[in-house]
Image (spheres, rainbow, N blue to C red):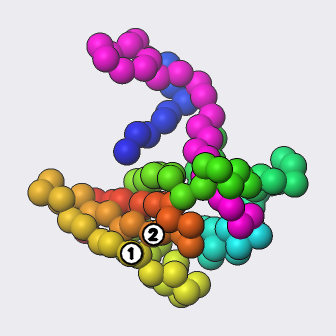
Amino acid sequence: MVAVTRTTRRPIAGRFARVNADLFAGISVRDYQGALAWYEKLFGCEPAFRPNDVEAVWEVDEHRYVYVENRPDHAGHALITIFVDDLDARLEQISSRGLSPAEQETYENGVRKATFRDPEGNEFGIGGPTE
């Protein structure tokens, strides 16, 4: 789980320097219309924008985006995780829209993670601290 900030810092050995950058995480799908419906349930809203006829983009935080793209040959292989400070509230909201996590885990350090799988097998995880 990587957090991107809008600050500039000196490079840390073995890591990218933090820079001003927008993050776009892509999910390839076969059934574009089906994916739109599923991700609208996950995010609780319509896409923020649609740059063309085969892509839809949701802004999950300022300068942080998740998009689905009709790319049948690459579908089903995405692994994305976001980290939030209100995990239980988000899981309740998603559940009220008809989706349930395929897995839920708690790591030794207390971090929790719920993993959702879209109909094509892409994984979208939502993690958060123990409350």
Percent x, y for residue 75?
Answer: 60, 55
129 and 24: which one is in front? 24
Q: Residue furthest front?
A: 73
**Does 5 lie within the magenta span?**
no
Circle 1: element type? loop
26 relative position to 90: left or right = right
Circle 2: element type? strand
What residue lies at 55% left-to-right and 30% top-to-bottom? 6
Span colored in magenta: 9-32
8 relative position to 107: left or right = right
Q: Quadrant of the C terminus?
A: bottom left
Query: Nearer the N terminus, badge 2 or badge 1?
Result: 1
Instruction: Using the rendered view, name the quadrant where residue 15 is placed.
Output: top left
Q: Which residue is mark 1?
A: 102
Crowding at dot 2, Cα within 10 Å, few <14 / some 14-19 / many 20+, comes out as many
What residue lies at 74% left-to-right and 64% top-to-bottom? 32
Q: Which residue is mark 2?
A: 116
Q: Amino acid at mark 2?
A: Phe
Q: Residue furthest right?
A: 53
Mark 2 and mark 1 in contact? Answer it, CB < 8 Å: yes
